[in-house]
Structures are given as C-alpha cells and as structure tokens.
Amino acid sequence: MNGKMARIGWVVDAQNDFLLPPEQGGRLYVHDLFDGGEDEGAQRAIPAIERAVEWMREHCDVMVYTGDWHSYADEEIDAASPDPSRGTYPPHCMGLSDDAAEREGAEILASIRPEEPIVLARAANADDARAAARRAIAERRPIFIHKSRFDVFEGNAATDDLLLALREGLGRPVEVYVAGVARDVCVKQAVEGMLAQRRRLPVTVLTDATWGLGIEEESASLARWLAAGAALMTTAGLALRDP
C-alpha cells in the first residue's frame, strides 16, 4: 500500500441496468442518447472497469461501490415521460421493487460484483456509516452505498459521515480512485462532490473506465475536473503507481 496516503477505490454505479444493453436486460444502458444510435455504449468500457476493479482490490485500502437503489416513488423515476435533460429517467436499478427481475437490474455487474459487501442503506445515519467504516477496515470487506438519487451525497445522507469515518479509521489522509458510469451524471456528481471545497479529497479519475450519456462532451468534463484539481489517467497507468 501507499505509505503516504490511504487509497479508496470508488466504483460508481457499475450495475446491470447501466452496463448491459437492452437485449441483455439493461433497462437504462449507458450510451450516447443523442447520436442516433451510433455509440456502442458502456460495454466498451467494461474491460477497463474490470481492470480498474482488479487493481483497486489489490492496491486500495478500502473498496466502495455505489449504486442507484430505486423505488417507483423516487423523484428521478418517471415511467410515463422521462426527460434526461430534466433529470428524470425510466425505471432502472429498482432495488426496492417487489419484482425479482427488476431487482437484478440493480445488482453490480457479475464480473466485478463485491463479495459480502457491507451495505450502507439509503436511510443510513451517521452511526450506521461509522459502523460500516469500522467493519470494512477491520474485516477487509467492501462497502456498497445504496442511493435514491444519482448524486451519492444527496442520495445517501450518510456518505459524508462514511468518508470521514474511513479517513479517521485508516489514520491518514486518503486519495480516491474513481471508475464507473455514467460519466456525465453519477460519476460527475461523485467526482465534483469530492473535489468541492467542503471535502477537498484528492481524486484520480480512470478515464477509460467510464462512459457517458452524451449530456456533456467527455473533453469538457475532463477539462473541468482537471482544472478543479483532479488527476486523470487511464487504467494502463495504474501499473506505474506505487505498489
């Protein structure tokens, strides 16, 4: 491990509904929504996401997965007239559904699915977050944050408490490595939330291990993150990091 800073591997919403195309059951497959169907979509990023997770499991002190965990009552779910430009989408990642097939869409992609994760439920509080952090560090187990909104800091109010507890439990400053989807929605909000003045966490975005919806050009997102202090690298560069 890095002797100077503790590492957190942060995998954003790598769920079946986002990473699998419709013919394989994905209900909100991440691809460019505005290019007329030419974009191959997030499946192109899966090998890089798998490489990122493999590296994180070996080199990070803690692994954190996040995932939409929706009910039909959530503000971001609109089964009748979804409009991504207004922040509403068709049903997806329905972890609170009574339907088993819908719940499967909320599960992490099988090839990178965490084993026996410690779940930080949508309604978790500060005590839950501190307990999750203690167990994750002591038992070397991943954490799975369930969220009601795309923004992990709004969709699970205990996220800030979890990050604070991880920093305290690890006993040194932390740096966060981020991969996942969608780059211009959930990844954007996670990265910019961590870079925000109130948190100021060092963030490295693994650029090839993300994919977007075409809401914002990739170059614009990356330039803004770089200007805000994030580091950008591909999964190929992970081999050059300190063991």
Image (tube, helix red, strand yellow):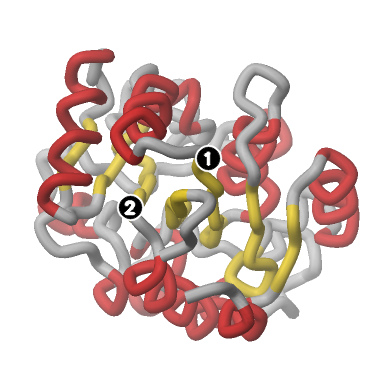
Q: Nearer the viewer, mark 1 or mark 2?
A: 2
As displayed, is residue 90 above or below residue 20? above
Mark 2 surroundings within 10 Å by alpha-carbon count, few (fewer than 14), some (14 through 19), many (20 or more): many
Q: Residue at x 34, y 40 (%)?
A: 170
Quarter occupied by residue 55: bottom left
Residue nearest the observer in this picture, 167 or 149: 167
Q: Residue at x 36, y 32 (%)?
A: 147
Q: Is residue 227 visible?
A: yes
Q: Quadrant of the N terminus?
A: bottom left
155 on left or right of 119: right
Q: Position of residue 201 (x, y in %)?
A: 61, 36
Q: Residue at x 82, y 55 (%)?
A: 222
Q: Earlier in the sequence, mark 1 or mark 2?
A: 2
As displayed, is residue 48 above or below residue 101? below
Tell me, for residue 180, which label it has, or none.
Answer: none
Q: Position of residue 50 (x, y in %)?
A: 43, 79
Tell me, for residue 62, which label it has, or none.
Answer: 2
Quarter occupied by residue 219: bottom right
> Label 2 amino acid?
Val
Identify the residue under disc 1. Answer: 89
Marks 1 and 2 in Cβ contact (< 8 Å): no
Rounded to the nearest angstrom, the CA distance separating label 1 from label 2 is: 31 Å
> Label 1 amino acid?
Tyr
Q: Position of residue 52 (x, y in %)?
A: 48, 73
Q: Is residue 10 visible?
A: no
Which residue is situated farthest in the front direction here?
3
For label 2, the SS is strand
As displayed, is residue 196 above or below residue 210? above
